[in-house]
Amino acid sequence: MGKKIVVLDDDKMMLQIAKRILEKAGYEVVTTDNSFGFTNLVKKIKPDLIFLDIKLPALSGDKMVPLLQKQLNYRPRIVLFSNKSKDELNILKEETGADDYLQKGDGEDSILKMAEKYLGK
């Protein structure tokens, strides 16, 4: 069984791309476009890595990081991703305690490289 990854993004196309790329590399991937109930989903699936979009309609990814860290009894790797600048993302990473960040415009293979960085090939 492969390492588990959860991707939360309100962009359905981004979810499809991430799922295709990461599953092809052998990871187990669950995607969702809804931040409601996300903590419960994470508790149920127990992913090794979480990709969180920052700009979500309800609860944004940067607000969700501390919530996850308080409510989970283990520590998955958390990567924020967005169209924001690298400087903005780095500040959010530091403020929230996320492990890393990824710019959506970095290309499709960047999400796989980030997964491999934290989970191995």
Image (spheres, grey):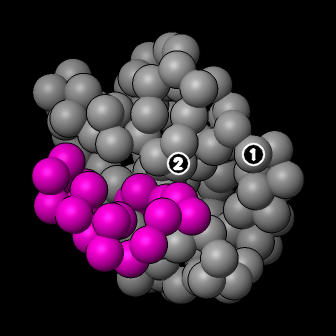
At which x and y percent is residue 69? 19, 36
Q: Residue at x 24, y 27 (%)?
A: 67
Compare residues 101 and 21 and report the one nearer the observer: 101
Q: Amino acid at mark 2?
A: Asp
- Asked if the residue at tag 2 contacts the one at tag 1, i.e. Cβ–Cβ closer than 8 Å, the answer is yes
Q: Decide: is 62 above or below 4.
A: above
| Nearer-N-terminus badge (1/2) | 1
Question: Dot 1: within a 10 Å radius of its alpha carbon, few (fewer than 14), some, or many (20 or more) residues?
Answer: few
Q: Is residue 87 magenta?
A: yes
At which x and y percent is residue 18? 72, 62
Q: Residue at x 53, y 84 (%)?
A: 113
Q: Quadrant of residue 12?
A: top right
- Residue 69 is left or right of residue 58, and the answer is left
Question: Dot 2: within a 10 Å radius of its alpha carbon, few (fewer than 14), some, or many (20 or more) residues?
Answer: many
Instruction: Mark yes or no: residue 115 visible.
Output: no
Q: Amino acid at mark 1?
A: Asp
- Residue 24 is left or right of residue 101, and the answer is right
At which x and y percent is residue 58? 52, 20
Instruction: Mark yes or no: residue 64 visible.
Output: yes
Residue wearing tag 1: 11
Q: Residue at x 20, y 35 (%)?
A: 66
Q: Decide: is 44 above or below 36.
A: below
Residue wearing tag 2: 53
Is disc 1 placed on a helix, strand or loop?
A: loop
Is disc 2 placed on a helix, strand or loop?
A: strand
Q: Residue at x 47, y 77 (%)?
A: 114
Label ID, residue 90: none
Magenta part of the chain: 79-99
